[in-house]
Amino acid sequence: MKKKNVSGNMLIAQSGGPSMVINRSLVGAVLEAKKHKCIRRIYGALHGIKGILEENFTDLGRESNTNLKKIAATPSSALGTVRKKPTQSECADIFNILNKYGVRYFFYIGGNDSAETAHIINQEAKKKNYELRCFHIPKTIDNDLRENDHTPGFGSAAKFVACALMGDNLDNAALPGVKIDIIMGRHAGFLTASAALARKFKDDGPHLIYLPERPFDMNTFVSDVKKVYSKYGRCLIAVSEGIADKTGTAIATKYIKEVDAHGNAQLSGSGALGDLIAAEIKRRTDIKRVRADTFGYLQRSFPGVVSAVDSLEASVVGMEAVRCAVSGDVDGSIAIRRKKGEKYAVYYKRVPLKNVAKETRAMPSNFINKEGNNVTKAFINYVSPLVGKLPEIGRINPFFLAKKLY
Amino acid sequence: MKKKNVSGNMLIAQSGGPSMVINRSLVGAVLEAKKHKCIRRIYGALHGIKGILEENFTDLGRESNTNLKKIAATPSSALGTVRKKPTQSECADIFNILNKYGVRYFFYIGGNDSAETAHIINQEAKKKNYELRCFHIPKTIDNDLRENDHTPGFGSAAKFVACALMGDNLDNAALPGVKIDIIMGRHAGFLTASAALARKFKDDGPHLIYLPERPFDMNTFVSDVKKVYSKYGRCLIAVSEGIADKTGTAIATKYIKEVDAHGNAQLSGSGALGDLIAAEIKRRTDIKRVRADTFGYLQRSFPGVVSAVDSLEASVVGMEAVRCAVSGDVDGSIAIRRKKGEKYAVYYKRVPLKNVAKETRAMPSNFINKEGNNVTKAFINYVSPLVGKLPEIGRINPFFLAKKLY
């Protein structure tokens, strides 16, 4: 039997890695919830399910709308976040706590692991015959959630990466050499692939892009780099942190293992993959200037570099989740789907929690070139509207003087 | 004898590391030069003195003003740059080339090494009794030029660092642990110190700041980190890449030397210092989550993150150099000086080339706290107007619920 307006409290929490727009989803959900009488109190749990288990709750209903708007525009998870999968007994505890606090509406913002958590809690409630409207709100800069055309957080992270590569391309042109940029994304290459948006002029980098979706072979790689370098006198390369060889072993892991044999455990550090690749180029070519940077956390929390589309969609998925929850005895995740047609437009669809949980998706084949060292036009068409306008770049039109070499 | 209007061609070039606003100085000089009839042709040398020696010149006078404006707003050195000190014989060659191309106005944009180069070329011209108006236009994100209150390029790089730390502080608060950010500046700590601008709320990081101006001691450091961690449950640390021990040996170098003994030359890589420090914290404390990022080139060429004051001043130093050059038989560097008074204002002063050449300056003592792990209010007052407005940040005002722990 469907009860349209089950009355009770709402609990919302954030999970997984922070993003530029995860607070848009939080505030979108809170502002929408305020409109519905069936939602009595609006609680936020600090640091995801850790906060639920410890009963660390804040009353978000008491935040002023002015402050909520500031929070919405702030990067990173305002409620705090956590990387934790609950055990079966913790799931039972969580359910008991929701029950104790009169929670009938539960929203968990995060990636596939968060969807999995929401799914388990929802099953626990069903088992106890407790009416819980349980929703997952998508967030991941990796863009790897199934059922979604793309996910909130990705567009802004992609904008950061595109801007970073635009700048680094200009830097590399000014002071030529080989430059390697290591970009986030352990299993899905979307974020690394977005580096391609940095190109404006024909000789602009990134000249090569390596993704976890294709096996990485050091010999082919070095040969690719040599080719580009002999053509342009420089080479800018975007590399996913998750690149792996044909057996599926991450290149970074391989390296760490080798070095561990020397007893240097500290090498599992932040710059290891970039340093390894740079060292191989130096060893196998006569190119002198080879540098590597690893972008790290800047990609997911740099304030001010936000995609307008991403920002808007992140708000809407939060609002949509609440609208769905008050519309009947339902649960699920809000997926973003792209409408067919020339102009970019999306719609939002409730999908089963289990469809988004656990497994993730990778880049489709038609987004990657045959050689596995670049993206296709299809990917550029896919990603451009998600990132939006980039800074304008100018360059000198050289009017070369005849040399007076006498 | 002063000739007010020596007629001849102008040559301009860029040198050293790129910056966000070095093209403002280039375009400022070119647009100003176009106003003066005594300057006949405006040549740009590609990649600094390397381009002069190879006679790789472009006619900048033929660039449209529309394109020049685009170039001005573009990060990195539009003419290309170089890290090269000329030998004595190359200086003679350079002088001969200037002579051959009828160059009477020479402008070199860069740091102290570029001032040194300009100084030597100027001396060569004097020796030959050739009237050359030779100017250095200041640029360095390190902010380490003598005679200057601050240098073009610094304010924008400082803005990037401040934004990065704002984001990373929110990230660290959401997912607590120890986070180390390695920031550029081998001998001067200004850029690392600017991380302090990221603080808004009382518990905001960076909680600790380590600069090359104070000896770095690993024991004191770990004890500092423990103190902060026990107070806030987290610790965000800004570390200059140039930190050194009390003997003046760079911590990064010490590490590389140790590792070299194992034959792993690749460890001189991008993340080495951050990884070393993170490993020491892990080894000496029971803190589990310790991460390090090294910002790398993003600090000097990320498009869109620019200080308006820095941008303006970079244009003006370029214009001022040309104005000075056409005003009489003079040479020098254009220094930025701050006017006394409540409100931020500057004036520009021609100073001798040799005063800016060779040696650099470090942070004054009153900008660093007694413990050597933070900056003072005096530094914040100094740096704030150079960086300008930062993104607004909001946070939840927690209205904690009483726990129902039954």
Image: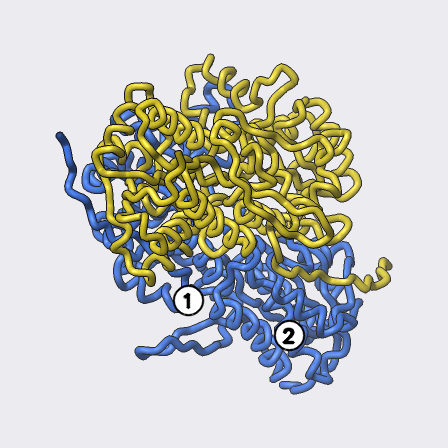
Chain colours: A blue, B yellow
Provide residue B213's location: percent of width, then percent of height: 64, 27
How many discs mark residues in the rendered view?
2
Position of B19 compared to B277: left or right? left
Would you say residue B217 is visible in this rendering?
Answer: yes
Q: Nearer the viewer, mark 1 or mark 2?
A: 1
Mark 2, Cα crowd under 10 Å, few <14 / some 14-19 / many 20+, is many
Choose between B157 and A331: the one closer to the eye: B157
Which residue, given by chain and number where applicable, does mark 2 sit on?
A: A133
Q: Amino acid at mark 2?
A: Arg
Would you say residue A255 is visible in this rendering?
Answer: no
Label 1 or label 2, whichever comes before in sequence order: 2
- Label 2 chain ID: A
Label 2 sits on a secondary structure element that is: strand
Q: Quadrant of residue B189?
A: top right
Of the 4 image quadrants, the one containing the N terminus of chain A is bottom right
Which residue, given by chain and number where applicable, does mark 1 sit on?
A: A388
Tell me if residue B374 comes above or below residue B381 in the rendering. above
Q: Quadrant of residue B49?
A: top left
Residue in the image at 72% along x and 50% along y: B341
